[in-house]
Every structure is written in structure tokens, then in C-alpha cells.
Image: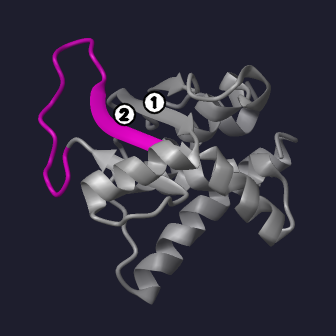
Amino acid sequence: MTPSESEHEDHPKTLVRVSQGDLPPERRLPLGFLRRTAALAVRQGSPAGQADPVEISLTLTGDRRVHELNRDYRGLDRPTDVLSFSLWEGQIPPPPPPGQPRLLGDVVISLDTAVRQAEEQGHGLLREVAWLISHGVLHLLGHDHPDPEARERMKALEDRVLAILEKDGAL
């Protein structure tokens, strides 16, 4: 653990359950990187003083599965890069049982789309996936981008996550 990600009492402990079972083994990404990125996004996007532990589900899959989810849950008949399914959309979550994390929801990423976007943007796949994880987790925390000002605030949080990963040599 590096100094920039050391645990502080004012940062929530984050449990990240990762699934990459739809992907062939050679396409799967390092679990530590995925979990660390999600935890950094939680730290950057959580309100000051929020220290309750949280749990997130993170799934990396392909365009076909994301297309199905996008069609079934958003009515958009196409793949996309990242989907967030908050358990508390527009609500304040109840406190978790003692000793249990607060469940935030699911982030689903299409690795196929991430590969294409990384190539289009001229950067590596890990950077693209880190951005997608950050974006999805911030949505779980209630951040959104309905207008340019909100988008800039959300982008600043995403950029902080990427900067920490870059500084520590993960990107």
C-alpha cells in the first residue's frame, strides 16, 4: 500500500467483488488493479466524513452482455462502455447491519468497448478501464453529469483517481 492510498479513518473501507467469468483467461485484468481503482473512486467521491464500509460489484464482460443489459434496463438497443446499477437510486441508503458494509450496487464494463475506446483515445487499456471504473463508481455514489458544470465536477474526481494511479506507476 502506498502513502497516497493508505487507510484513513475518514475514508470508507471498500469491498469490491469482481467478476470476469465471461472473459477468456487471457483477457482478464489483474484483480488488485480493479479493486484498487474502485476503492480510490469511492474515496474520491464519498462525502467528507463518510467512513462506513461499502461494497461494490464490478463485472467485466463483453459487448454482447452489456448490449443485453443496456437494452433491458435502459431501453437502448446497443452496447455501451459502462453501466451503473445503484441499489439506492435517488435515495439515502439505510445504515447497514452492524459489522456489514453498505451495499452500493453494480458496475458493468464492456471490455470490448474499452479496447476500442483506448485505441481511439491513444492510451492504454488499463487507463481506459480505470476511467470507466471511476465513472461507474461515482454514479453509484450519486454523482451525475446532467449539465456541463456537473460534468466538470465529476471529471475532476475521475482525474484524481487516474492521477493517483499514474503517480504510483499503475498506469
Residue 80 image offset from top left, x and y in percent: 51, 60
Which amino acid lies under the numbered mark 1 shown in the image of this protein?
A: Glu
For the residues labelled 2 and 1, say whether their Cβ atoms are less than 8 Å apart: yes
The outermost residue toward the top is 99
Badge 2: few (under 14), some or many (20 or more) residues near its Cα, within 10 Å?
some
Left or right of 46 on screen, residue 32: right
Element at label 2? loop
Viewer-proximal residue among 37 and 64? 64
* Residue 94 part of the magenta-drawn span: yes
Q: Does the magenta stretch include residue 77?
A: no
Residue 41 is situated, as x and y percent measured from the top left of the image, at: 53, 47
Quarter occupied by residue 4: top right
Q: Give the label on residue 127, or none.
A: none
Q: Which residue is drawn at 56% across and 70% down?
A: 155
Q: How is the image coloured?
A: one colour
Please report the bounds of the magenta region as a residue range: 88-108
Q: How crowded is mark 1: few (under 14 residues within 10 Å), some or many (20 or more)?
A: few
Measuring 16% from the left and 58% from the top, which residue is drawn there? 90
Q: Can residue 161 be seen in this view?
A: no
Going from N to C along the chain, the mark reached first, 2 or 1, is 1
Residue 88 visible, this orientation: yes
User: Which residue is tagged 1?
Assistant: 9
Identify the element where label 1 is drawn: loop
Q: Name the residue under label 2.
A: 51
Above-or-below relation of 100 to 62: above
Q: List x then y, in percent, for residue 29.
A: 72, 31
Prevalent SS, magenta region? loop
